[in-house]
Amino acid sequence: MAAQSTVTEYNQSIRVQAFQRKYDGWNYLESINVIDNATIAPQTDLKSDADLSFYLPFPVQIFNGGVYDSDLRIVPSAMVDGKVALRHLPDIEPHFVDTPIRLNGSWLYGGFHYRQFGHSVTESVGRLWALKKYNHPVEGIIFNCFTGRGRYKEETDEGLWLEKIASIAKRQEFFVELLKVFGADLPVHFVSKTVQVDRLVVSSQLMGLLPYGRLMGGHETYREHIKTRVHEIAEEFRLEPGRRVYVSRSRFKRFGPGCFFMEDLLDLNFTMAGYQVIYPETMALAEQLATYASATHIVMVASSACHVAALAMTGCQNVAVLSRFYRQSDQFTAQLSAMGAASVIPIDCLAGCFLPSSESARTTANIDRSLIHYAVDFEALWNVLKKNQFLDGNLTDNGKNSFAYRSPELCKALEDQYKVGPFSFVPRASNDYKG
């Protein structure tokens, strides 16, 4: 057993290095480490025990939890890469929650599992490539749970934190399906209390959401693993190749962050233009992947569906990504390109948005994006798609495409939904569309 002072110094040095590496972490190289008598501490507080004065003036948040060896030294390869403003720094000493749970045998460490879909389909699968590379059986996969606890003042209660852990575990159905796509049909243990494992297989994270680094498109080993699986899935479905696909959000939520005004008409227009309109939330993950893999042209809204589509890029897909907010992040187009799309074009054709008319409600809308409903300029969108050979012909006009025709309907629906008074359309300050 190493001296406590030596372990403390080592752990502190690891955390300093973790912050300094910022964009390119130590997990980019393919590696597999087997940790005997490993300890996995749950994430318990975004603040961690780090001295934030060390990191100033950088605007960062810290979350803890992590993997330790038998001497309670931090295992660097188990740390999360791919985050800039939110840094993963395990505590100097692991936070023991009750009596540790003991798991016998060998287990694969899957990293952190997230409640947010997009992070689960990217960051939570970046270590599963080891299932094909590690030549020994494992009992299952262990995931720590990113709870976000501590972000808000009311979330400091231990009971609320355990409720969040439980809510993550309840969302296993899709996640288990996702794991099977990656060839991981194994038991899954979600860490809610400190866990000690006979042997923990820690593979490097070869996929993550790091816009300015190399993990966005995945390491070659990761891409090879998922593309092999997607090819097998596509062979099972045997869909006719050459299709054009529009990925709609119109049935996902009528009201919610990033909802388009009149998206039902987008569905109609794309259908009449010969596109297959799909609703991912109604499809099994394998069917989604097979559909994307068989397409030559895909039009989709910037959303988590892009992360799934990126898994199925074969070098034949031309993808158009529609902004659903002003100043939309480029992470979706970056990932689609990195994962092998033939071409990716971002399209910003938002003409304006619907907001509550009262000043107080608009102040709330600046915080709560669900109160902001953006409107697409149909003519500008169609012109961009035609220019980039995604469409032939003109925008369908059934007399129902104008804002004047449909605005009263939506304004009344929004008023009934949110109970914050009347809504009105606010034109965008500039019509200089990026598309």
Image: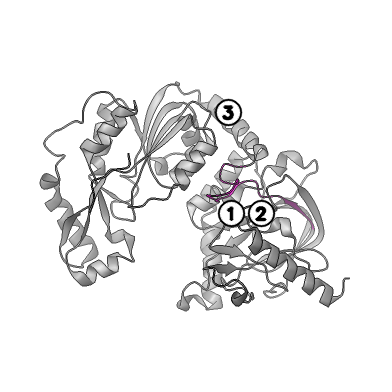
Quadrant hosting residue 371: bottom left
State which region is magenta. Answer: 199-218
267, above or below 418, in the image? above
Q: Name the foreground residue: 247 vs 158.
A: 247
The stretch drawn in magenta includes residue 203:
yes
Q: Is residue 49 above or below residue 348?
A: below
* Residue picked out by circle 2: 25
| Badge 2 vs badge 1, beta-carbon distance below 8 Å | yes
- Which residue occupies 27% across, 26% down? 273
Q: How far across and down, in percent of the image, does residue 225 sit?
A: 65, 36
Q: Quadrant of the N terminus?
A: bottom right
What amino acid type is highlighted by mark number 2? Gly
Q: Is residue 19 one of those drawn in magenta?
A: no
At mark 1, the secondary structure is loop
Q: Are marks 3 and 1 in contact (CB under 8 Å)?
A: no
Q: Is residue 285 visible?
A: no
Mark 2–mark 1 Cα distance, whole angstroms, equals 8 Å
* Left or right of 354 in this view: 106: right
User: Which mark, by number, is residue 231?
Assistant: 3
Q: Is mark 2 on a helix, strand or loop?
A: loop
Residue 375 in picture, x, y percent from top left? 24, 48
Q: Which residue is drawn at 60% across and 71% down?
A: 55
Viewer-nearest of labels 3 and 1?
1
Give the quarter of the image for residue 269. Answer: top left
Q: What label does residue 82 carry, if any?
A: 1
In primary-sequence order, the first of circles 3 and 1 is 1
